Image (cartoon, rainbow, N blue to C red):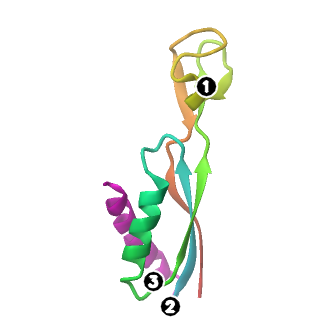
Amino acid sequence: MHELGIVFHMIETLEKVGSANELTHISKVRLNLGEVSGVLPDYLLDCWRWAANKTELLTGADLDVVQIDAITVCNACGKTYGTIEHGKVCPYCNSPDTVLLQGNEVEIDTIEGW
């Protein structure tokens, strides 16, 4: 369960941001989570609820997880496509010369607090 490690890292980052911005409480965090990041949203939310409530800054804070769709580009034909539906091989030209453009993110997007 690497979700707990991710939550601990998020809390550390949020505490630094909170301190730098003189926040006394963070009420909501929006997290962009890529479709192929390997992070399970339900586990992440359970870990968040447990760990955030153990900190003064984040007690009761909501975590809003926004899924980022996985999109791949084909270097051979230049077209993009949904990674989950088609995998690594381009559905347009059958080339395996592809690169994931988005969908692997785990990034804090916005923070609400005072």
Which residue is under mark 1?
Answer: 73
The label nearer to you, 3 versus 2, is 2
Q: Main secondary structure of the magenta part?
A: helix
Q: Residues within 10 Å of mark 1 (few under 14, many from 20)?
A: many
In this picture, residue 8 sits left or right of residue 79: left
Q: Looking at this view, is 78 or 4 the one in front?
A: 4
Query: CB atoms at circles 3 and 2 under 8 Å apart?
Result: no
Residue located 42% across and 44% down the image? 38
Among numbered discs 3 and 2, the one appearing first in the sequence: 3
Q: Earlier in the sequence, mark 1 or mark 2?
A: 2
On the rendered image, what quadrant is the C terminus found in?
Answer: bottom right
Q: Is residue 4 magenta?
A: yes
Residue 93 quadrant: top right
Distance between mark 3 and mark 2 Cα atoms: 8 Å
> Mark 3 touching mark 1, by CB under 8 A?
no
What span is colored magenta in the figure?
1-22
The residue tagged 3 is 19
Name the residue rendered at 37%, 72% in the picture.
12
Q: Is residue 107 above or below residue 97?
A: below
Horizontally, is 18 left or right of 55 in the view?
right
Q: Secondary structure at mark 1?
A: strand
Q: According to the image, label 2 marks what residue?
A: 24
Q: CA separation, marks 1 and 2?
A: 43 Å
Q: Please determine whether, in this image, residue 85 is positioned above or below residue 21.
A: above
